[in-house]
């Protein structure tokens, strides 16, 4: 009787648990799964934003994107621009945010720690449009950032061409994105560091472990779940970047060096009204994001298997 009663209680709890998850499943189905399926179906057509009629063309959009050249605004150029931006932003953002989080946690006065957390997190609150506009002013030849560059390089009146040179333009967008989101990921690392029990560090001190040894052998292994979370979020954030590049182009900069795939999707679908082709780009971006997310999960699982 006890076993039957226990089984019935667990069954009832499972039913109620499933019932409470139904709203979340419906939300994801409507706002996540349906758009993905709809975009995939649209990518197999020649649908136009204005014309009501469209034809099923199969994989022609995908073949066109990978074989035909559209000047400097092809998919290959967008993948290159997205790759440069992601690598140039993702790796420094994860590494520097971890270093900043460790430094903040080393502060003994709680008031100072909170002050630094607030200072680093403030840019993340700003709109991407506002952040891009502020930095475009700073990158002007007479702007503060160009003057600071002259001071560091010990030059006078030099224009570093932050908004005109192709390579400098790419670096400019990286700087803006790095500045805006570094504080957000620093806070995530601080949360992860705060969850590590202090008794572990006390035991390490008693055993005579140095700070560097403690960081590599205790902090980093215990911080792996947070590192994986930050890595995936930072990578996805970089891959779907749009606002910064769009605002720079609207401000008069060249589009080709910073024509990331999301901006190419916008110009193809909204400006040129080729919804089928832009949907194919969206599916390609989705597959790329899914692949790198799976790769990071696989790498993390492999490290855990080796460790244990």
Image (cartoon, rainbow, N blue to C red):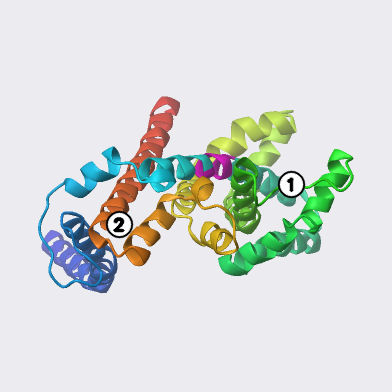
The disc label shown at residue 278, or none: 2
Q: Nearer the viewer, residue 45 or 72?
A: 72
Residues at marks 2 and 1, CA–CA distance in whole angstroms:
44 Å
Q: Position of residue 48 (x, y in %)?
A: 22, 65
Q: Which residue is mark 1?
A: 103
Residue 144 is drawn in which quadrant?
bottom right
- Does any portion of residue 206 appear in the rendered image? no
Q: Residue at x 49, y 48 (%)?
A: 256
Q: Is residue 50 left or right of residue 104?
A: left
Q: Secondary structure at mark 1?
A: helix
Question: Alpha-carbon neighbours of circle 1 within 10 Å: few (<14), some, or many (≥20)?
Answer: few
Evaluate whether residue 171 shows in this view: yes
Q: 14 or 31: nearer the eye?
A: 31
Task: Give 230 or 50, whichever is nearer the viewer.
Answer: 50
What span is in magenta? 85-91
Residue drawn at x 89%, y 40% as measured from the top left? 154
Image quadrant occupied by the N terminus: bottom left
Residue nearest the viewer, comparing 259 with 87 = 259
């Amino acid at each position: 009787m006890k076993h039957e009663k226990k089984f019935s209680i667990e069954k009832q709890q499972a039913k109620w648990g499933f019932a409470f998850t139904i709203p979340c499943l419906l939300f994801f189905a409507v706002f996540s799964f349906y758009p993905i399926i709809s975009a995939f179906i649209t990518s197999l057509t020649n649908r136009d934003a204005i014309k009501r009629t469209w034809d099923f063309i199969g994989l022609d959009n995908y073949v066109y994107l990978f074989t035909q050249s559209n000047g400097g605004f092809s998919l290959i150029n967008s993948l290159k621009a997205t790759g440069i931006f992601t690598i140039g932003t993702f790796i420094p953002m994860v590494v520097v945010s971890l270093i900043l989080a460790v430094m903040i946690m080393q502060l003994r006065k709680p008031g100072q720690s909170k002050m630094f957390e607030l200072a680093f997190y403030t840019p993340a609150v700003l709109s991407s449009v506002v952040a891009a506009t502020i930095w475009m002013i700073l990158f002007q030849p007479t702007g503060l950032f160009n003057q600071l560059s002259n001071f560091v390089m010990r030059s006078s009146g030099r224009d570093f061409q932050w908004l005109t040179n192709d390579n400098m333009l790419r670096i400019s967008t990286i700087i803006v994105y790095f500045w805006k989101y570094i504080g957000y990921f620093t806070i995530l690392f601080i949360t992860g560091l705060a969850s590590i029990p202090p008794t572990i560090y006390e035991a390490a001190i008693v055993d005579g472990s140095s700070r560097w040894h403690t960081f590599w052998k205790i902090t980093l292994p215990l911080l792996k779940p947070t590192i994986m979370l930050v890595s995936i979020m930072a990578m996805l954030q970089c891959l779907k970047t749009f606002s910064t590049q769009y605002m720079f182009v609207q401000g008069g900069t060249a589009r080709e060096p910073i024509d990331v795939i999301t901006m190419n999707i916008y110009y193809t679908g909204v400006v040129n009204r080729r919804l089928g082709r832009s949907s194919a780009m969206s599916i390609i971006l989705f597959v790329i994001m899914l692949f790198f997310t799976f790769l990071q999960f696989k790498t993390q699982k492999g490290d855990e298997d080796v460790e244990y």
